[in-house]
């Protein structure tokens, strides 16, 4: 057996049957071996390596399995860097296999040689160079264990040509479940959870803020149980969205810069805040010096480095969310906080009349972004996996989508990678073929990875591509209007005819320029499982509100360009 | 000044993994010493760094988060016993007729490592201030070469704190094997 065969056998042993990749010189032995495994291993040929890595991210985020990428050395490897950094900050399990030049050429500026370890070490959970075929099984097993366990993240395996072509006398694959220097899941400390339960039971105005940790830990039901039993309202970060259904009684909306008014305002009124599986990103906290000063803060996270990193906590609990919430919902006594919860609803009423209704039902003028998102949520009966790009489309996608099952929003949160959405939607559809996958992107972001239309065409992936076209880099334009004296520097976009592009790829397509066409277009789009391009020509100068301007605290909320929320 | 001690697996690139955590925060490493410990396969990094407690706490957590790092700790100077080693070279001619030279070395608790016709090599261990004092005292003879090592440190607690951790992990591994 060769090293290349060992790589493929190792991937199969880990249950990885789908890989995203692009061939090239230094990875050719692996691709050659793939030829023999076409019945067992599905390889998605992308159009650019960035597409491969974002597709793998979308895949992992949709189904929870580790995404696998195989690319060549040099430019192949450097083209996946953005996605690796994205997966690191958004805790997405990936195993990225990069080809590398022969052992003897390392460090000699060989053709397509790059210091992949040096580049990726700061942005991976683990990076390792395999130089001998004997090390492949060990390294791949370790890679999958590291990527998926604890707080997930990306792992890079840089495989030299020698390791790929070298011969192995025997191959035995053993999954890894132990690394002595690495404890992925800490032992639960019951006494700390007792303390947390006591704090929650004494709270008059408790609030749960949760993030993607709930999804990664499969703690959705435990979170729901705690909310129900102890009568605690809960608010989500961007990446935590869909962990609780939109219609869940105690779910009060999204936190952060473009989040809902209630969760943001009440952050600074709650007496006890329980933060679970979230990391107090600055887009959530706004100015930290005014963040939740009145509250006692309990922080549960599987990554001990997150506890106290941004916000000083009164009680840090280093634990897996599922385990901790399960215990906490047993220990916390039954309670109701109806009056407190009603305060959130009151905020929502104001938000509805001032922001939401004008966005989703303006009745006149050009189509709004939120209107399109809302229509997709309505027609799809909340069943879709929503994948967004980054910017206004992302915030609108997050605000106006509705979710009734977990893992239904896939977006680039921490890194904010424009161009993420389209390939991520491809990965999501491959992971969950039975669910509709709706991508929302702007005219800017879609063009960053628009080459992946080729992948959609070749692999016949039924992704619904909704381009919210306002002929601007809308989010930057919004900031320019609000904070840079309306000096629109380099944000105007002259766009191609997306319908002709759709035609060139053979996709069903429709351009919507008026409100009257919207519903029928969305219905047509969702009537089958084929790829579809829906270009929504939206109001050019639309803005996302509410908004906590950068540098302001969570209670400094703009309702529109002129009006601030008054308590 | 904080002294960080890191116990890591003997893996290629571990030093890089540690140092980039400082680079990312634009933190300067004041001194660095890497050596094998008596525990097989475990290397110890001793890093001195001047910054705030909040920053060092964050840095150490991020270091410990690296897969190949076994444990990382940080200490203030009063929590450890630490030394640096300094080597000095002066010209033999310059000291030959000076009757006070040996006394000077004695005063500074320094030793001669080698003496030959052209130069004298001197060694001194101590804290930075002490090795600098000797440097200044030797300046009148003309110091041809001077070098100082990074800090090495041991804690005031009896065992290196990594031992009990590794023992517990070994127990856990055995448990995993038997449960298989």
Image (cartoon, helix red, strand yellow):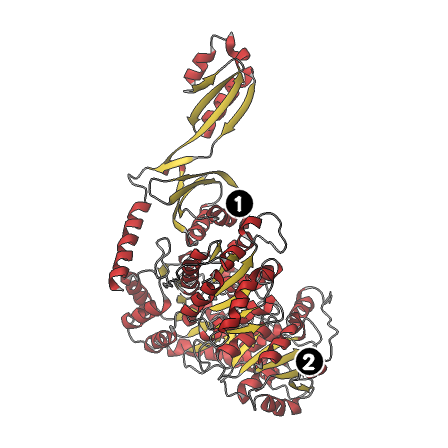
Query: In the structure shown, which secondary structural element does the residue marked by tag 1 occupy?
Result: loop
Residue A447 shown left or right of residue A186 in the figure: right
Q: Mark 1, chain letter? A: B
From this view, report whether residue A441 is shown above or below residue A360: above
Q: Which residue is mark 2?
A: A539
Tell me the quarter of the picture where residue A143 sits. bottom left
Q: Are marks 2 and 1 in contact (CB under 8 Å)?
A: no
Query: In the structure shown, which secondary structural element does the residue marked by tag 2 occupy?
Result: loop
Residue A456 shown left or right of residue A194 in the figure: right
Where residue A459 appears, x then y in whole percent? Answer: 58, 79
Res. A208 in view: no
Q: Residue at x 71, y 65 (%)?
A: A485
Q: CA distance from mark 2 to mark 1?
A: 47 Å
In depth, the one of A391 and B32 nearer the eye is B32
Q: Quadrant of the N terminus of chain A?
A: bottom left
Where residue B101 appears, x then y in whole percent? Answer: 47, 12
Where residue B40 appears, x then y in whole percent? Answer: 34, 44
Tell me the quarter of the picture where residue A195 sits. bottom left
Q: Mark 2, chain letter? A: A
Disc assigned to residue B27: 1
């Amino acid at each position: 057996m060769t090293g290349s065969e060992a790589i493929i056998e190792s991937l199969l042993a880990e249950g990885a049957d789908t890989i995203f990749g692009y061939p090239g010189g230094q990875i050719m032995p692996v691709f050659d071996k793939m030829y023999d495994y076409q019945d067992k291993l599905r390889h998605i040929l992308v159009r650019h390596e960035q597409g491969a890595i974002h597709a793998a991210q979308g895949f992992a985020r949709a189904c929870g399995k580790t995404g696998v990428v195989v690319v060549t050395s040099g430019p192949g490897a450097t083209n996946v860097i953005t996605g690796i950094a994205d997966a690191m900050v958004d805790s997405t399990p990936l195993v990225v296999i990069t080809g590398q030049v022969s052992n003897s050429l390392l460090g000699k500026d060989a053709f397509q040689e790059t210091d992949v370890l040096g580049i990726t070490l700061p942005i991976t959970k683990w990076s390792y160079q395999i130089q001998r075929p004997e090390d492949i099984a060990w390294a791949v097993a370790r890679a999958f264990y590291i990527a998926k366990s604890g707080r997930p993240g990306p792992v890079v395996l840089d495989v030299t040509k020698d390791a790929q072509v070298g011969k192995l006398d025997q191959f035995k694959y053993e999954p890894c479940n132990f690394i002595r220097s690495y404890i992925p899941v800490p032992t639960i400390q019951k006494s700390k959870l007792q303390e947390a339960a006591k704090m929650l039971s004494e709270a008059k105005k408790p609030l749960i803020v949760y993030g993607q940790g709930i999804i990664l830990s499969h703690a959705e039901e435990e979170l729901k149980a705690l909310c129900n039993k102890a009568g605690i309202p809960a608010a989500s970060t961007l990446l935590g969205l869909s962990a609780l259904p939109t219609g869940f009684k105690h779910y009060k909306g999204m936190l952060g810069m473009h989040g809902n008014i209630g969760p943001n305002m009440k952050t600074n009124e709650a007496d006890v805040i329980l933060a679970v599986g979230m990391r107090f990103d600055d887009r959530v906290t706004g100015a930290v010096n005014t963040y939740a000063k009145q509250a006692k803060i309990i922080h549960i996270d599987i990554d001990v480095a997150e506890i106290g990193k941004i916000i000083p906590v009164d009680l840090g609990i280093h634990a897996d969310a599922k385990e901790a919430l399960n215990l906490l919902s047993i220990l916390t006594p039954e309670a109701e906080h109806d009056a407190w919860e009603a305060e959130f609803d009151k905020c929502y009423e104001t938000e509805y009349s001032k922001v939401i209704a004008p966005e989703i039902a303006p009745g006149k003028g050009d189509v709004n972004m939120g209107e399109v998102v809302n229509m997709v949520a309505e027609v799809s009966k909340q069943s879709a996996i929503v994948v967004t790009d980054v910017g206004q489309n992302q915030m609108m996608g997050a605000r106006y989508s509705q979710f009734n099952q977990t893992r239904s929003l896939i977006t680039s949160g921490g890194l904010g990678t424009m161009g993420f959405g389209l390939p991520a939607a491809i990965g999501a559809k491959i992971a969950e073929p039975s669910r509709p996958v709706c991508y929302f992107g702007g005219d800017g972001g879609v063009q960053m990875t628009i080459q992946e239309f080729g992948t959609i065409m070749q692999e016949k992936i039924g992704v619904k591509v909704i381009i919210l076209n306002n002929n601007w880099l809308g989010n930057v334009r919004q900031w320019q209007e609000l904070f840079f004296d309306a000096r629109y520097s380099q944000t105007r976009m002259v766009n191609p005819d997306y319908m002709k592009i759709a035609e060139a790829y053979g996709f069903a397509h429709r351009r919507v320029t008026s409100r009257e066409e919207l519903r029928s277009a969305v219905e047509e789009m969702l009537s089958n499982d084929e790829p579809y391009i829906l270009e929504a020509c939206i109001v050019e100068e639309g803005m996302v509100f509410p908004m906590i301007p950068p540098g302001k605290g969570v209670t400094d909320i703009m309702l529109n360009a002129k009006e601030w929320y008054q308590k | 000044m904080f002294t960080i001690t890191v116990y890591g697996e003997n893996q290629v690139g571990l030093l890089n993994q540690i140092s980039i955590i400082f680079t990312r925060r634009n933190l300067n490493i004041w001194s660095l010493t890497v050596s094998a410990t008596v525990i097989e396969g475990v290397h110890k990094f001793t890093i001195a760094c001047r910054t705030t407690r909040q920053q060092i706490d964050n840095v150490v957590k991020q270091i410990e988060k690296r897969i190949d790092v076994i444990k990382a700790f940080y200490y203030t100077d009063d929590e450890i016993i630490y030394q640096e080693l300094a080597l000095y070279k002066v010209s033999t001619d310059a000291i030959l007729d000076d009757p006070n030279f040996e006394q000077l070395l004695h005063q500074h608790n320094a030793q001669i490592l080698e003496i030959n016709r052209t130069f004298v090599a001197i060694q001194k261990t101590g804290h930075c201030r002490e090795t600098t004092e000797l440097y200044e005292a030797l300046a009148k003879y003309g110091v041809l070469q001077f070098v100082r090592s990074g800090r090495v440190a041991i804690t005031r607690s009896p065992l290196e704190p990594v031992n009990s951790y590794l023992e517990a992990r070994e127990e856990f591994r055995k448990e995993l094997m038997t449960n298989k």
